[in-house]
Amino acid sequence: MTLVLLPGMATLAQLETIWRGNGAVALDPIARAKIDTSAAVVAAAAQANAPVYGVNTGFGKLASVRIAPRDTQKLQRNLILSHCCGVGEPLEPGTVRLMMALKLLSLGRGASGVRWEICALIEAMLDRGVLPIIPVQGSVGASGDLAPLAHMAAVMIGEGEAVVDGRVLEGSAALRAAELEPVVLGPKEGLALINGTQFSTACALAGLFEGWRAARAAIVTSAMSTDAIMGSTAPLHPEIHRLRGHAGQIEVAAAMSALLAGSAIRDSHRHGDSRVQDPYCIRCQPQVTGAAIDLLRFAARTLQTEANAVTDNPLVIGETAEILSGGNFHAEPVAFAADQIALALAEIGAIAQRRVALMVDPTLSFDLPPFLTPEPGLNSGLMIAEVTTAALMSENKHLANPCSTDSTPTSANQEDHVSMAAHGARRLRRMTENLSMILGIEAICAAQGIDQRAPLATSAALQAVLACLRAQVPALKQDRYLAPDLRAAAACVREDSLAQAAGLEVAL
């Protein structure tokens, strides 16, 4: 089934569907009128005498060089080929698809001056599974994601490389395999394809989508950990959170209360518990995870706006036949959003790691066995799993350092301030992988702790989560090779299995 996108109105749900799936994507036909109008404006400008950047001039520092009408096609082709300077590993397929769809959305606004045929080819490539190989390094996030987008555009003109049906082919062969023809670029079309923030935005959105699932899982694992160490639910009282007023905090506290409702473990120590207050990693979970959720939602709004934006240069105003030079290609909003996501991911992982440390420490876990093994000494239990969470937490802290505060001049000082959005967004993949593992290990530890509380049982909601986890990771009765268990638990986080098993309704 084809997912139809209305330029300017694409939703995060639609974008996540594109990223996670492999179905066809198309512009709403209503977009064609504006596309055709702006293309006509550019065609006229290409034949006129007045200099128009990127239409009949060179690029960047070479903008003062006039280009004759007879060289227009060669100008655009040369632009693509010369900008294919990306290096590094290839971008993962889902993010390539999302990047292509974002470029389609941007061109679909009818302010880029490309012909409908350009959009139709992107649609056909998505439909038939022609995915350009996009090296992930080479963009500084200003003047657009030039190198990554040039590798996409190269396949459209029969150059570069692409994957089709699992095979890596040269661009022209890839198009032939899908029964498609390369396009000959007209005035401004090469520039429109590589100017823009679609690589950075796609990578940031991928981080957001994975990060949101991790945040949902963190609400569930934090409730599990609270019951495992026989923590108090008093700090979840709604009045505490209403008095502060932050939406995420209020929502997390309510969700955790619902998850723990009916727990016999909790009811067993409501009275006569010698502990007055739990450590912050238990008591302040709504304040920390809730703040992270608020930050993720703020970043999501920025990225949704950017996904629907026109970010190339110059822009074509079809209604007035104007061609305006500006700087929408500067990815500062995306860089800020990526930094915000990174901060949220790091803090969710930081407090989760402290909960893991709490559960494996017999001096703090309220009578759980050391390292959560029934026979400590002979068995080491989850001792080194906790160390792994510490390593991943620390790595994420380093990765969370801001990228948006960095800049360096490029292109002979013409592009003298850049956003660094590209690698700011790319690091989110590694951070979400680390966070999923931290939370997966927390789930294993918490399940082990809850099992130790038998015959007391946790809540019905958390019993459903335990059943989901235990289908992948059996209880740890004696030491065994743990690496597959850690991977399986992390997959439960990435696949949203734990949150769905709990019936969690917290949505982006």
Image: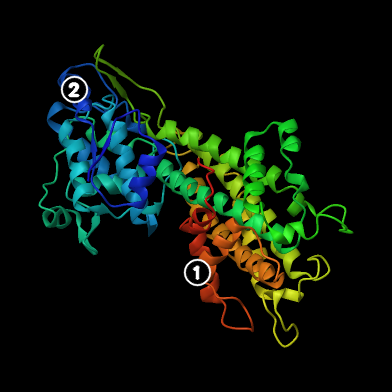
Q: Residue at x 78, y 66 (%)?
A: 365
User: How many discs appear?
Assistant: 2
* Nearer to us in this view, 445 or 40: 445
Q: Give the quarter of the image for residue 60.
A: top left
374 versus 338 height, above or below: below
Q: Find numbered disc 1 in the image and state the secondary structure of the residue it sits on.
A: helix
Please report whichever mark, 2 or 1, sits nearer to the chain's N-terminal start.
Answer: 2
Q: Position of residue 105 (x, y in %)?
A: 30, 34
Q: Position of residue 173 (x, y in %)?
A: 14, 57
10 versus 19 height, above or below: above
Q: How far, Cα to Cα, is label 2 from label 1?
A: 50 Å
Q: Find numbered disc 2 in the image and state the secondary structure of the residue it sits on.
A: helix
Q: Position of residue 290 (x, y in %)?
A: 64, 42
Q: Residue at x 66, y 39 (%)?
A: 249
Question: Is residue 311 something that shows in the picture?
Answer: yes
Q: Which residue is mark 2?
A: 33
Mark seen at residue 252: none
Q: Residue at x 69, y 31 (%)?
A: 245
Toward the top, the furthest residue is 320
Q: How is the image coloured?
A: rainbow
Q: Residue at x 30, y 29 (%)?
A: 7
Mark seen at residue 488: 1
